[in-house]
């Protein structure tokens, strides 16, 4: 099994190297492409990995888009008030964790329909974000914070890379290990697969599932704050642009595996990075319609979901409130 996985990984790496060679000869700047891909990957990976923990435990939160929007806005506000972009990132993390906690409490103790709660988060964010931007900064839907509060990336001889991107890669390894090799991971998986057995063993289903919801919200919140403070350098009311739903597509394609989620997040990030580079590369941007270029990440999303949706394996009790017999 491991040999087959390594063969597939080697084949994917070889194909990617060939693609980069072709793009380089076509006039693309490969360093800019990789840098843009890693930036686009980071929030998707964080949200998908966090939600993998949540869904392994039996809850489903489709409100990632809303968490992205709210945490991005609050992150910028906290960064400006404190004068420190890292505090803004921490605020996004905390806001996301709080939303995850609310989601968990409503789903576990309130027995609420988890899909409806997730939709509620998204709808709330759609109204909250433009109102907050207008109320705080007095502008309709867009705000550019001072450069001093933005989090600078690490300069390397090849590309600039964010600390948060490096953290996302480390988290993928740690979460994968936690879910598969630790007692906590066993409890989380049992909460999704066989909650009755976990309850009989004396472990709280409620606390285990709420923990997963908080982890999901916190990592999604960090990804949300990452977008304006590290990536875009500003906040607009549509800043997430459907990335919360793309993160769910990453999750489905990965089969709730954090390491695979990192790989698929890079695939989607590469698609978005490619769209960006196409849009700015002389000689190419004139030949390819701009709006068609913007569709690339979403077309890739539909194709990948169509391929992997039938192969994804989810916990037996996912989305079902636990009721002790």
Image (cartoon, rainbow, N blue to C red):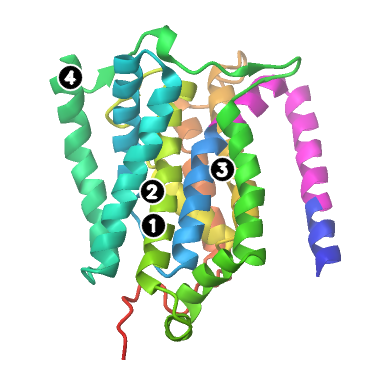
- Labels 4, 1: front one: 1
Q: Check the image and report above or below for 124 versus 323.
A: above
Q: Is residue 302 visible?
A: no
User: Tag on residue 217?
Assistant: 2
Q: 22 or 89: which is nearer to us?
A: 89
User: Secondary structure under badge 2?
Assistant: helix
Where residue 94 appears, as percent x and y from the top left, is 36, 39
Q: How would you rate the neighbour count of disc 4 (Cα within 10 Å): few for under 14, some for 14-19, many for 20 or more?
A: few
- State if disc 2 and disc 1 touch (CB < 8 Å): yes
Residue where numbered disc 3 is placed: 268
Mark found first going from the N terminus, 2 or 3: 2
**Does residue 22 appear left or right of residue 47 in this picture?**
right
Find disc 1 in the rendering and name its residue: 213
Q: Nearer the viewer, mark 2 or mark 3?
A: 2
The span picked out in magenta is 10-39
Labels 3, 1: front one: 1
Residue shown at 59%/59% (left/top)? 254
Distance from Cα at disc 1 to Cα at disc 2: 6 Å
State yes or no: residue 27 in magenta: yes
Answer above or below: position of 14 versus 306. Answer: above
Looking at the image, residue 93 lies above or below residue 152: below
Residues under labels 2 and 3: Cα distance?
A: 21 Å
State the CA–CA distance, disc 3 to disc 1. Answer: 24 Å
- Secondary structure under tag 4 reads helix
| Front disc: 4 or 3 | 4
Which tag, 4 or 3, sits closer to the chain's start? Answer: 4
Our reading of the magenta stretch's main secondary structure is helix
* Residue assigned mark 4: 136
Q: Secondary structure at mark 3?
A: helix
């Amino acid at each position: 099994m491991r040999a087959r996985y390594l063969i597939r990984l080697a084949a994917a790496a070889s194909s990617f190297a060939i693609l980069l060679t072709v793009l380089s000869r076509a006039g693309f700047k490969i360093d800019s492409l990789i840098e843009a891909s890693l930036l686009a990957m980071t929030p998707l990976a964080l949200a998908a990995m966090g939600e993998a923990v949540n869904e392994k435990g039996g809850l489903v939160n489709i409100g990632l888009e809303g968490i992205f929007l709210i945490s991005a806005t609050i992150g910028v506000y906290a960064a400006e008030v404190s004068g420190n972009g890292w505090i803004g990132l921490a605020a996004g993390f905390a806001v996301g964790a709080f939303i995850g906690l609310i989601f968990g409490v409503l789903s576990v103790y309130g027995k609420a329909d988890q899909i409806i709660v997730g939709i509620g988060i998204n709808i709330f964010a759609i109204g909250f974000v433009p109102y907050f931007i207008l109320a705080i900064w007095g502008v309709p839907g867009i705000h550019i914070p001072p450069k001093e509060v933005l989090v600078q990336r690490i300069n390397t001889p090849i590309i600039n890379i964010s600390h948060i991107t490096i953290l996302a890669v480390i988290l993928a390894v740690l979460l994968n290990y936690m879910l598969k090799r630790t007692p906590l991971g066993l409890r989380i998986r049992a909460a999704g697969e066989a909650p009755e057995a976990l309850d009989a063993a004396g472990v709280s289903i409620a606390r285990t599932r709420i923990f997963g919801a908080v982890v999901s919200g916190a990592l999604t919140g960090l990804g949300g704050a990452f977008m304006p403070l590290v990536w875009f350098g500003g906040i607009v009311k549509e800043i997430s642009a459907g990335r919360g739903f793309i993160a769910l597509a990453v999750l489905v394609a990965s089969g709730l595996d954090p390491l695979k989620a990192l790989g698929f997040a890079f695939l989607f990030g590469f698609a978005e990075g490619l769209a960006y580079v196409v849009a700015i590369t002389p000689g190419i941007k004139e030949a390819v319609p701009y709006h068609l270029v913007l569709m690339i990440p979403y077309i890739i999303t539909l194709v990948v979901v169509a391929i992997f949706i039938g192969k994804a394996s989810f916990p037996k009790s996912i989305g079902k409130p636990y009721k002790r017999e």
